[in-house]
Image (cartoon, rainbow, N blue to C red):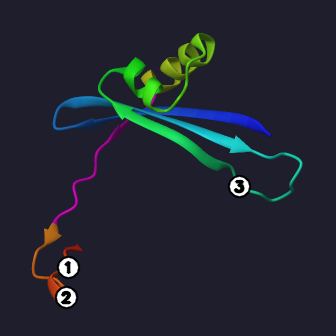
Amino acid sequence: MENLYTSYTKVVENKTYYFVKKFMVFPEIPNLEPVLESYGMHTDFKKACSIAAVNDPKIMEQLLMEADGTVHMAKVIGFNTTGISGKILAI
């Protein structure tokens, strides 16, 4: 088993949020996709890493460089409040 990490940013309502994800990878099992172990989201990069249980300073430095190079715009999804059986449907 190995760990794989990814990070990126998204701008939501003019605030930059950091997203950090930690995956488990099993190279000994062919065709098995990475399994999400933990993730964190916060406007403070260190807090996002803490939430995602990433504590290694070298990994955090690499993730910060990765995140600063990738900015994704947030997608706004409208909600229809007159759903079936009182449930809210995404439109």
Q: Whole-percent x and y of residue 34?
A: 68, 49
Distance, label 1 to label 3, CA atoms, is: 33 Å
Q: Between residues 10 and 48, which one lies in front from this camera angle?
A: 48
Which residue is tagged 1?
87
Disc 3 crowd, CA 10 A, few/some/many (<14, 14-19, 20+): few
Which residue is tagged 3?
33
Q: Whole-percent x and y of residue 18?
A: 38, 30
Above-or-below relation of 37 to 69: below
Q: Secondary structure at mark 2?
A: helix
Image quadrant containing the C terminus: bottom left
Q: For residue 33, what is the image quadrant?
A: bottom right
Q: Secondary structure at mark 1?
A: loop
Above-or-below relation of 29 to 54: below
Residue 3 in the magenta stretch? The answer is no
Distance, label 2 to label 1, CA atoms, is: 6 Å
Disc 1 crowd, CA 10 A, few/some/many (<14, 14-19, 20+): few
Above-or-below relation of 65 to 52: above
In the rendered structure, which segment of residues is drawn in magenta?
A: 70-78
Mark closer to the chain start, 1 or 3: 3
Tell me: 85 left or right of 16: left
Q: Are marks 1 and 3 in contact (CB under 8 Å)?
A: no
Nearest-to-viewer mark from 2 and 3: 2
Distance, label 2 to label 3, CA atoms, is: 35 Å
Badge number at residue 84: 2
Q: Residue at x 61, y 18 (%)?
A: 59
Q: Amino acid at mark 3?
A: Glu
Residue 77 in the magenta stretch? The answer is yes
